[in-house]
Image (cartoon, coloured by chain):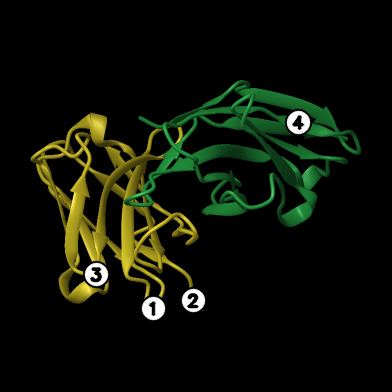
Amino acid sequence: AQSVTQLDSHVSVSEGTPVLLRCNYSSSYSPSLFWYVQHPNKGLQLLLKYTSAATLVKGINGFEAEFKKSETSFHLTKPSAHMSDAAEYFCVVSDKDTDKLIFGTGTRLQVFP
Amino acid sequence: DTGVSQDPRHKITKRGQNVTFRCDPISEHNRLYWYRQTLGQGPEFLTYFQNEAQLEKSRLLSDRFSAERPKGSFSTLEIQRTEQGDSAMYLCASSSGTSGALYEQYFGPGTRLTVT
């Protein structure tokens, strides 16, 4: 069975400092991995996806993630946080036959001025 | 591209009542998914359709839940005899393609159900 584990339920950073949201995955085959963001009262939005091409994936709004097979990790980073980045972030793995998404429990990112 | 729409956005119902939610996917998307998200948790898969065929149902989907996608267009999710534990955000997503995970799922804004 596939799963993802988000290692931090809450992360707080100051505006302008780097962001690191950690995710480990478990999969019996080469996974497809995603990061989604959910702002309050808004729908889920795809930030980026890894589908066995380049291991460093660039997404929207300056976010990127690196797939590390040896560490079974897919951490999300951003060099400089912005107030508008405050939201809930989900690490996600997809089922290779049905494409159904399996979500982590989420990391709430707070950005302080 | 009008995106995925869901109706209603909010529903308050009394325990024991039946409710029905509607999802309109992006036009020509052949896959449609339903997820449920409870407070403080990530969304959990409920069921999905390939065109009009319902191909998988989660064990989370009890006999009180039924979903349809007539003609492979919009979908409805009905909950009969609602219970307080059904209170959650119900999310719909759609995607194109027939296999693989290369196709992005686009999510609607969700229907928030509160059972009193």
Give the letter of the chain under mark 4.
A
The residue that disc 4 covers is A20
Task: Estimate the spatial distance between the alpha carbons at disc 4 and disc 1, rounded to whole Å.
Answer: 36 Å
The residue that disc 2 covers is B2
Asked if disc 2 and disc 3 are in contact, CB closer than 8 Å, the reply is no
Asked whether the residues under marks 2 and 3 belong to the same chain, the reply is yes
The answer to which image quadrant residue A87 occupies is top right
Asked if disc 1 and disc 2 are in contact, CB closer than 8 Å, the reply is yes
Q: Amino acid at mark 3?
A: Asn
Task: Estimate the spatial distance between the alpha carbons at disc 4 and disc 2, rounded to whole Å.
Answer: 33 Å
Task: Estimate the spatial distance between the alpha carbons at disc 1 and disc 3, rounded to whole Å.
Answer: 12 Å
Q: Which color was chain B given?
A: yellow
Q: Is residue A112 left or right of residue A107?
A: right
Q: Which mark is residue B27?
A: 1
Give the letter of the chain under mark 2.
B
Q: Which color was chain A given?
A: green
Question: Toward the viewer: B10 or A99?
Answer: A99
Which of marks 3 and 2 precedes in the sequence? 2
Element type at mark 2: loop
Q: Is residue B8 above or below residue A31?
A: below
Residues packed near mark 3 inside 10 Å, few (<14), some (14 to 19) or many (20 plus): some
Labels 2, 3: front one: 3
The answer to which image quadrant residue B80 occupies is top left
Give the letter of the chain under mark 3.
B
Q: At 56% across and 45% down in the image, what residue appears?
A: A34
Question: Toward the viewer: B76 or A53?
Answer: A53
Give the letter of the chain under mark 1.
B
Does residue B116 appear in the picture of this structure?
no
Element type at mark 1: loop
Task: Estimate the spatial distance between the alpha carbons at disc 1 and disc 2, rounded to whole Å.
Answer: 9 Å
Q: At 56% across and 51% down in the image, what residue appears?
A: A51
Question: x, y (%) of residue B29?
Answer: 37, 72
